Amino acid sequence: MRAGGLRWPDCPIRARHPALLNQLRDAGCREFGFTEMTPLALRPLYEPEAGDDEMVILTSRRTTFELVLRRYAEALPGVTIAPNTFVHAITVEAGDGAPRVAGASIERDGKTETWPADVVIDAQGRLSACPEQLREAGAHVGEEAEDCGIVYFTRHYRRTAADPPPARATATGDLAQNDPDRKMYVEILDRTTGAAPAGYTTTNAGPLNVAVLGSRYQDFRAYPDGSVAYPAPGSNATTINILRILGCGG
């Protein structure tokens, strides 16, 4: 997943937070230059121009990017992150000629609070309810639209009545990797048919729950012997559990 396209001369991460950039690199984020992004069929026709070497895209899984960014932000002076806090609405006061945003109404631990603020930044994306709340308060909210020239395609599948409902996860990423409700299951299947081997049942073929915390993004590493391994959080902040799965001979 691409975390974002950043042109280095204009990139605030490189200019203002070089330590963050190094942490992202250490976490496996990769940088793709303009040449690497050029399709193979067009590379013989490509003639470099001044500044092309500065056209760099930083790529990673979104969870990796957000986790590194969160840890970096938490360590900055004057920064407090309030997890499990939900913003219901902005609070608006009458101003001189235009309404003024004075804070936000939030819910935390089952209680509703109002947090006052000198500045409120709405980073909820295009589905944010803030513009409509401002219009209802009498503010003029302008909008500019421009065709970006990019088209996305997707594919939808219809679930049959026999299929179990899909697991529902958060829509904004997966940072709750230590949630005790996360489960990991393994299942024994025939590599040819994809079904449980002859003589096996759901009792001994699975799905079988294993004692490691699951994750929304399982990242198994394959080994030459055909086995795969998955690192999971351990019992404390300095340990991990390794789930290793090996092939079975008939």
Image (tube, helix red, strand yellow):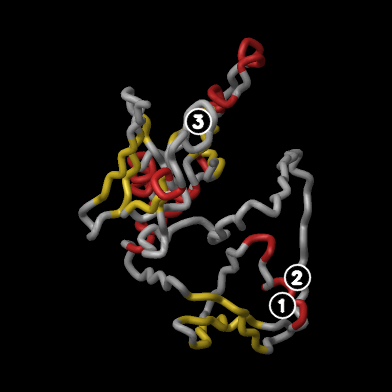
Residue at figure coordinates x 56%, y 74% from the top left: 120
Q: Which residue is mark 3?
A: 32
**Height in image: 52 above or below 236?**
above
* Quarter of the rendering containing residue 130: bottom right
- Which secondary structure lies at badge 1? helix
Estimate how packed mark 1 is, as few (under 14), some (14 to 19) or many (20 or more) residues with alpha carbons within 10 Å. Answer: some
Q: Are marks 2 and 1 in contact (CB under 8 Å)?
A: yes
Name the residue carrying label 2.
141
The reply to whether residue 13 is visible in this rendering is no
Q: Judge by depth and name the residue closer to the eye, 162 or 23.
A: 162
Q: Which part of the image, by quadrant, shows the C terminus?
A: top left
Q: How much space separates mark 1 and mark 3, taking CA atoms? A: 40 Å
Q: Position of residue 146 (x, y in %)?
A: 78, 48
The CA span between labels 2 and 1 is 7 Å
Residue 240: x, y in percent? Answer: 25, 50
Mark 3 belongs to which amino acid?
Answer: Phe
Q: Quadrant of residue 42?
A: top right
Q: Residue at x 51, y 28 (%)?
A: 33
Reading the image, the residue beneath label 1 is 134
Asked if residue 87 shows in the view, the reply is: yes
As helix, strand or loop, the secondary structure at mark 2 comes to: loop
Q: Residue furthest front?
A: 199
Where 47 sits versus 212, above or below?
above
Which numbered dot is residue 157? Answer: none
Which class describes the residues within 10 Å of circle 3: few (<14), some (14-19), or many (20+)? some
Considering only order in the chain, which callout, 3 or 2, is on the residue closer to the N terminus?
A: 3
In the displayed structure image, the side of residue 37 where residue 98 appears, left or right = right
